[in-house]
Image (cartoon, helix red, strand yellow):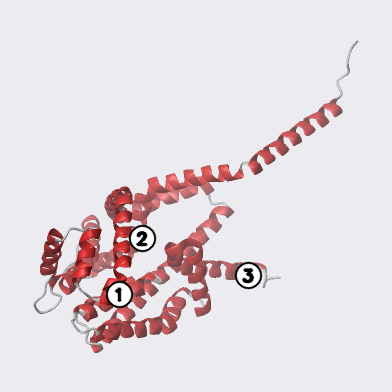
């Protein structure tokens, strides 16, 4: 008996089979979404970890590129120091840009050493203090019994009453240190790895700056190969150009704000009678580029110098001086300078920093304002194009 082939029935069977397979795959994905996302994120983080030196090098080169171009243009147009050959001029500009940045960092480090490490008071130096500390611990082993004996030697009722708490506290510290020795070792390894990563990124960034036109041409070729001048490519190119422009304005605004904060901090600390106010002010200005964390660095450093001056009241003077500078910065400088540099209202500037901090921590705070400004420009362009036209 011959069975007739029913095309319609076969088509329905194929549709049902495909639908069943699709439903099964969807349920499989839903029930394993956590593992799938975990694996995807693990792969992404692994790729980012491998590319970390390159990404850091791109950031360094991006920041130093304007400085390099300024020096290069100067060497091209200056009659006395003019360099005719392009390659020599570019290499010289790159070297001078790195030397200038390293000179500033070296001067700051030397200033910190001279400020704190060179001399704490007229007769007391860091070397003396370290020697005294080493001598003390050589003669007084760190143990609960030695601490107890030391406390009892004070012969004070108040200290005797606090003796159990002090001994317990030192015991807890000792136990914590012993338990976390392995973590400390891994932390040291991590620090060493970070230093190596930064050194590799530093070397790569030199080549990126030296041959910037070459790498830009490679990017343009890849861009054309992928998009071939399509509408999606044009939109992506426009988005990148907006982000590049806004980030450039933001960096310039941050540097201008750092300059104002550094000058104000130096003046305020000088009035408060704090030594090395210029060095502290410079550090406060640079660290102020890091939201929230930066101002704390300047304040703590000023308070430490007030403490080391030998006059405890200067600690209060230093803290008050830095708090006044921070209020001026928060209420006047940051909203106006940074906000105007990227075209954001002060309210949206503060909101962007808060949201960025909650979402991405310190890095989120650093890039929140330029990203918000980029979004504003893109939204305004889209609004004028699609809404106002209609």
Front one among 178 and 350? 178
Q: Quadrant of residue 307?
A: bottom left
Q: Secondary structure at mark 2?
A: helix
Mark 1 or 2: in front is 1
Mark 3 nearby-residue class (10 Å; few <14, some 14–19, many ≥20): few
Residue under label 1, please give it: 300
In the displayed orientation, state which residue is furthest to the bottom. Answer: 271
Tell me: 174 left or right of 127.
right
Q: Is residue 1 above or below residue 12?
A: above
Q: Quadrant of residue 248?
A: bottom left
In the displayed orientation, state which residue is furthest to the left. Answer: 123
Labels 3 and 2: the sequence-earlier one: 2
Q: Is residue 233 above or below residue 309?
A: above
Residue under label 2, please give it: 62
The CA span between labels 1 and 2 is: 31 Å
Labels 1 and 2: the sequence-earlier one: 2
Residue under label 3, please give it: 383
Percent position of residue 213, x then y: 34, 54
Residue 102 in view here: no
The CA span between labels 3 and 2 is: 31 Å
Q: At x 35% / y 73%, what residue is drawn?
A: 296
Mark 1 nearby-residue class (10 Å; few <14, some 14–19, many ≥20): some
Marker disc for residue 123: none
Front one among 275 and 344? 275
Residue contact at pointers 1 and 2, CB within 8 angstroms: no
Labels 3 and 1: the sequence-earlier one: 1
Q: Secondary structure at mark 1?
A: helix
Task: Classify the position of the N terminus by image quarter.
Answer: top right
Tell me: 145 left or right of 180.
left
Q: At x 50% / y 65%, what residue is drawn?
A: 358
The CA span between labels 3 and 1 is: 47 Å
């Amino acid at each position: 008996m011959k069975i007739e082939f029913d095309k319609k029935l076969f088509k329905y069977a194929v549709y049902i089979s495909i639908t069943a397979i699709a439903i099964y795959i969807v349920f499989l994905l839903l029930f394993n979404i956590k593992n799938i996302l975990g694996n995807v994120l693990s792969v992404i983080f692994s790729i980012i970890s491998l590319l970390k030196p390159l990404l850091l090098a791109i950031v360094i080169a991006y920041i130093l590129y304007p400085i390099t171009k300024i020096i290069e243009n100067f060497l091209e147009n200056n009659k006395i120091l003019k360099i005719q050959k392009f390659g020599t001029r570019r290499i010289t500009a790159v070297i001078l840009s790195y030397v200038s940045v390293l000179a500033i960092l070296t001067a700051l480090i030397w200033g910190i050493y001279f400020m704190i490490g060179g001399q704490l008071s007229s007769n007391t130096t860091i070397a003396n203090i370290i020697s005294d500390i080493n001598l003390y611990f050589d003669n007084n082993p760190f143990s609960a019994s030695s601490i107890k004996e030391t406390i009892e030697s004070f012969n004070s009722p108040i200290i005797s009453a606090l003796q159990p708490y002090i001994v317990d506290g030192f015991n807890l510290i000792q136990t914590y240190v012993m338990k976390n020795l392995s973590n400390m070792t891994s932390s040291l390894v991590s620090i060493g790895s970070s230093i190596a990563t930064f050194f590799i990124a530093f070397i790569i960034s030199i080549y990126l700056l030296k041959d910037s036109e070459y790498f830009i041409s490679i990017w343009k070729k890849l861009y054309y190969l992928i998009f071939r001048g399509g509408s999606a490519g044009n939109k992506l190119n426009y988005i990148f150009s907006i982000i590049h422009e806004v980030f450039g304005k933001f960096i310039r605004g941050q540097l201008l704000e750092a300059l104002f904060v550094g000058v104000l901090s130096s003046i305020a600390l000088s009035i408060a009678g704090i030594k090395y106010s210029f060095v502290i002010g410079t550090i406060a200005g640079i660290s102020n580029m890091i939201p929230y964390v930066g101002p704390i660095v300047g304040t703590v450093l000023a308070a430490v110098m007030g403490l080391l001056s030998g006059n405890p009241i200067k600690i209060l003077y230093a803290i008050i001086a830095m708090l006044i500078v921070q209020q001026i910065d928060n209420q006047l400088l940051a909203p106006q300078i940074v906000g105007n540099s990227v075209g954001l209202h002060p309210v949206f500037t503060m909101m962007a920093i808060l949201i960025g901090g909650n979402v991405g921590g310190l890095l989120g705070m650093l890039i929140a304002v330029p990203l918000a400004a980029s979004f504003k420009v893109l939204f305004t362009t889209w609004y004028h194009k699609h809404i106002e036209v209609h």
